[in-house]
Amino acid sequence: MASSALGWAWLLSELLDLILDRLLEFTDYVRFCSVCKPWRIIALGEDDGDSGYHQLHRQRHCILKSCRNKLPMLVIPTKHNTDDFRSFYSIVDGKIYDLPLPLPCETRFFGSSHGWLFTIDKSFAITLINPWSGKTILLPEFKDPWGKYQDWLDDYDKFPGKAILSSDPCMNPCGYEIAVIYLGSMELAVFRSGDNAWKFLTQKKDYFFCDVVYYKGLFHAVNHLGEMVRVEDGTDRGVVEPTLSPRDISTIHLVKSIRGDLLMVQRFTELNENQEPADVFKCKTVDFKVFKLLRTDDQARPTWVQIESIGDQVLFLGDNHAVCVSTSEFPGCKPNSIYYTEHYFDEFGYVPCGTDDDNGVFDLGNRSIELHYVPDPSQKPLLPAIWIVPNFITRAITATRGCGNHGGALMASSPRQVTGAGCESGPKLRVFQGIDSMIALAIWHKIGIGYKS
């Protein structure tokens, strides 16, 4: 038995790489790491015996493999959350996992993008938190020049509506951008790594944006009419004229398909039955419509064309940076469907989830809705749940020199500690100590504990 185990531990790295290439789910990746130390070293690209170009090449290869399309997990608020553990819901096995991740338990996350979460504090400073690596990025104060933020001093965490990244700051520490839609008039602000302040979009008119996406190297934002603008040099450039009726539309999402198409998704809601007329925010999703951006030879500008099916693709929509995956990679998902979770906000403010539980799976084929995660009614009211893509980059990443401290942004080693400037000397970002607990969690899962069904 001992010799057999030893043989498994020392399989050729090339063979282990082939196995890693076939792992689809985040939980499978963690279980691979838990087998033995040699397998962990291969998976995380931490072979200290390598040096120079070979080591860097291997690290980047591991990073690229781990950054393939991953299936989002749902960060769910429960009264059992602490600052050291958070609950995550897996749609594949329908289980709740308590992961040892250092996240503030009473903080609303108003955005999720590339595995990072967005929060804001009383000084209107936005912080990026990567729960998988324990890193944080502290951004400059988010105070618009028109002083609209002053109306939100008592509800600062409700001022930003949504935020996304252009790329993962770990992978691109000196070239990432951030876009934030903020409440009041649903305008847009952009931050670029290396800058010392936010740039607030100069708009030709009031658009009242409801979503933003990074597409073909630029941010694109859309309003309820389907009117989309492209952000260039801090100003808007109209690319799609309004073509839709706002009647009964709750919100619109933008998402890049796995085939590179830009999709616009309309979400329709209705008031719940048996409720008071004053409860205007107690709504349930009843329908979705999907449009694809197309340009014909006789059109000066592209236009939205409705499509009836997205094939084997699956969309994950909510407060998060919209995600599209394929069921060929994740057979546990329902094809031609939209997994959604929502909270309600508009130009008048933000209403916490808990007044209603609008989570579900919409089948574009038969137009039906079924539930995925159902919150415990005894634990209301709670903050909204949010999708997050596991960002299991635990390798050392050497940042490019010369980008200072991310401009006005500071890199911290954990959500509780700011250790100093970012990547002037090429720091290495390594996983926080909780990763060993996550690997232990994978072992617990094998024997039937470590999760709540």
Image (cartoon, rainbow, N blue to C red):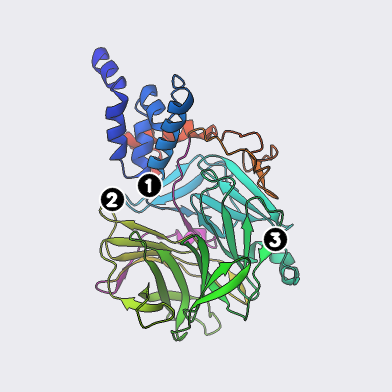
Mark 2 belongs to which amino acid? Glu
- Residue visible at 32% across and 35% down in the picture: 446
Give neighbour class at mark 3: few <14, some 14-19, many 20+ (Cα, 10 Å): many
Looking at marks 2 and 3 on the same chain, the residue that comes earlier in the sequence is marked by: 3
Task: Give the magenta range.
Answer: 365-394
Give neighbour class at mark 1: few <14, some 14-19, many 20+ (Cα, 10 Å): few
Looking at marks 3 and 1 on the same chain, the residue that comes earlier in the sequence is marked by: 1
Residue 354 is at least partly visible in this image: no
Tell me which corner region of the image, top left, top right, bottom left or bottom right, holds residue 424: top right
Is residue 142 or residue 341 the one in the foreground? 142
Tell me which corner region of the image, top left, top right, bottom left or bottom right, holds residue 74: bottom left
For the residues labelled 2 and 1, say whether their Cβ atoms are less than 8 Å apart: yes
Image quarter hosting the N terminus: top left
Which of label 3 and label 1 is nearer to you? 1
Tell me which corner region of the image, top left, top right, bottom left or bottom right, holds residue 309: bottom left
Q: CA distance from mark 3 to mark 1?
A: 32 Å
Secondary structure of the residue carrying tag 2 is loop
Residue 368, percent from left and from top: 29, 72
Q: Is residue 181 magenta?
A: no
Secondary structure of the residue carrying tag 1 is loop
Q: Which residue is mark 1?
A: 68
- Left or right placement of residue 337 versus residue 411 in this view: left
Q: Which residue is mark 3?
A: 142
Q: Which residue is mark 2?
A: 329
Secondary structure of the residue carrying tag 3 is loop
For the residues labelled 3 and 1, say whether their Cβ atoms are less than 8 Å apart: no
Q: In the image as oriented, which residue stretches furthest toward the front?
A: 297
Q: CA distance from mark 2 to mark 3?
A: 39 Å
